[in-house]
Image (cartoon, coloured by chain):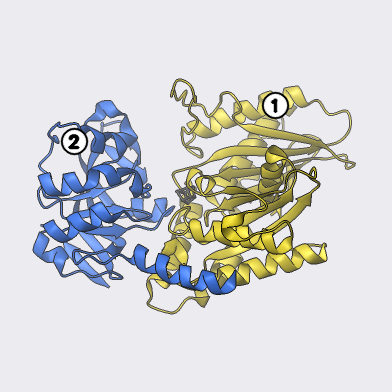
Chain colours: A blue, B yellow
Amino acid sequence: MKKLNYPFSPEAVRELKVGDMVLITGKLFTGRDAVHKYIHDGNKPPVDLKNQIIYHCGPVTMKDKNGKWTVTAAGPTTSIREEPYQWEVIRDYGIVGVIGKGGMGQKTLDACKEHGCVYFHAIGGAAQVLAEKIKSVDGLYLEEFGLPEAIWELSVEEFPVVVTMDAHGNSLHKEVEASSKEILKTVM
Amino acid sequence: MTKKVAAKKVAKKVSPKKLDSKQQTIESLIELIRITSTVVPNDVFKTIEAAAKNEVKNTTADYAMGIIKQNIDLAKYKSQPLCQDTGTVIFYIYHPPGFHQTPFKELIKKSVTLATKKGYLRQNSVNSLTGENAGTNLGEGHPSIHFYEHKSKEVEVKLVLKGGGCENVSAQYSLPDTGLSAGRDLDGVRKVIIDAIHKAQGKGCGPGALGVCIGGDRADSAYYAKKQLLRKLDDKNPHKDLAALEKDIVETCNKLGIGPMGFGGKTTLLSCKATHANRVPASFFVSISYMCWAFRRQGVVLNKNFAIKKWLY
Ligand code: SF4
C-alpha cells in the first residue's frame, strides 16, 4: 500500500506505477461531464487546478440546518466520457491526477506521460466506503450545473484507489484487454 | 446476517397495528425498497464472500473485493444505498385471482416517491424528451411494474434495482454472428455470451451476474433475460442443457483473467442464469442482462393486512 499526500506534484505521481494500491490524503475536486465541457469550450476553471486531482464523481450531498454540506454517497462515474477533453485539462491546467472508473484512452495516457499525471481507479459502486473517506466539503463551484455536476472541493483521508494508468505510458486496462483477448481465442 | 434480521425486526415493531390497508401497504413497500437498496440478498453476499476469499492476497483484485465487502457492511449498518446509482426500479407482483392491480399501482408510486424522499432511492428518473428530472422517480414507464396472477392467496412483491452502468453493458445478439463464428445452436449462444463479458470488462462494476434468454423476439428476449435475475445465485436450473451452459459460462469467463473492476484476477463473473423462449424461424436472439456486484434484489410475501409476512431472499 502506498500513500499520496497533499500537496501533490508531478514528481510525486511519477513515482507511482500501474497496479499500485494508493491511499490519497488531501484535496480532491469533483468534475464530470458539464465541467469538462465547460473548460473545453474555453472557459477558465473557477479554481486553480495546478497540481490538483480531479475526481469523476457526481456525489449525493446534503445540507444541514447550519448550511453545512456533507457527502452521503460518492462513488466514481465512468471516465471514458471525458476522453475528448481530459488531455486538454491536463495540459492547460496542470492537474496531476484523475480518479474515476473504467479507465481512459490513448489521448489521456499520452497526456499523462507528457505532463506528469496518473489515472486512479476507484472501486465502482463503493459509494459508502468512499463517502466515509471524505472528511469535509470545503467549496462548491459552478453550482448552476446542478449539484451532481458542480465542482466540489473535498478533503479526503486515505481515499483508496488503484493506479491503472501511470505517467510512463503504461495502462492496466490495455494489458488486461490484451491478455484476456488471447485467452478468449483459446476458449471460443 | 444478524444485523439484517435485527433491522427488519425493529422495523416491524414500530409499525402500529391500526394502520388501514393502504397505509400498511405503503409502509411495507417502503421497507422493501429500503432493504433492497441497502442490503444485498444473502445468496449474493455468500457468492461475493466466496469470490473474495478466492483472490490472491495483496493483489488489486483482493483489494477491490475487500472494499466491496466493506461497502456492503457499511451500507447495511448505515441503512444507506449500496451505490449512489439506485437504478431503474422494477417491481414484479404475483397476486391471487380477483386482485385489483390499478389501486396497487398507485400505492407503489406513492411508496417510491416517499422512499426517494427518505433517501433510499436517488432522484434517478429523467424525462427522455426534455431531460427533466421530477425528483420523484415517477414518470413515463417509471417505476417499471409487472403483474402476474398466481394460485396462492397471498400477494408477493419482488423488487430489482438495476443500475445504469451495468445496463449499458447488457447486450442482445442476433444469431448467426459471423464475426464471432457463432451459429444458431448452443455453441453459438455460448460464444456470444462470452463475447459480451469480454466487452464488458472494466465497465459495469464487475464481478457481475448474468441473466440470459435464448430466443424470443427482441423485446421478450430482453425481458426474460432480466427476469432471470430474480433467481437465487445458488439455485439449480432444472433444465439439463441450461444448467450445463450456466456452469460452463461462469467457469469459462473466470478463466479470462479480467477480474473485479477489470483489474485482472480470478473472479470476472459471479453467476449466470439462463432461460429460453420460442422464436420464429427467421430470428434467433440471445439477450444478456448484466448485473453489477451491487446486486439489489429482494422480495416479500404480504399477509392479508398487507404487512410483511416473510422475506423471500
Ligand atoms: S454499475 Fe452498479 S455498482 Fe456500478 S455504478 Fe452502476 S449501479 Fe453502481
Which percent across, then down, holds residue B143?
61, 31
How far is the residue under mark 2 from the one under mark 1?
45 Å
Residue at (77% x, 52% y) in the render: B276
Q: Is residue B20 visible?
A: no
Q: Going 20% across and 48% down the picture, which residue do you hit?
A: A87
Q: Which chain does the residue under circle 2 lie in?
A: A
Q: Position of residue A96 (x, y in %)?
A: 16, 55
Q: Which mark is residue A52?
A: none
The amino acid marked with disc number 1 is Lys
Which residue occupies the extreme front position in the image? B178
Residue A137 versus residue B249 in the image, above or below: above
Label ID, residue A39: 2
Classify residue B245 as left or right of residue B210.
right
Task: Determine the residue positioned at 61% across, 72% down.
Answer: B251
Going by the numbered disc 2, the residue's amino acid type is Ile
| Whether residue A9 is situated above or below residue A49 in the rendered picture | below
Which-is-in-front pick, marks 2 and 1?
2
Q: Nearer the viewer, residue B99 or A179?
A: A179
The chain to which mark 1 is attached is B
- Which type of secondary structure does the marked residue at label 1 adopt? helix
**Do discs 2 and 1 belong to a common subunit?**
no
Q: Quadrant of residue B84?
A: top left
User: Total marks drawn?
Assistant: 2
The residue that disc 1 covers is B105
| Few, some or many residues within 10 Å of mark 2 (<14, 14–19, 20+) | some
How far across and down, in percent of the image, does residue B52 sit? 50, 71
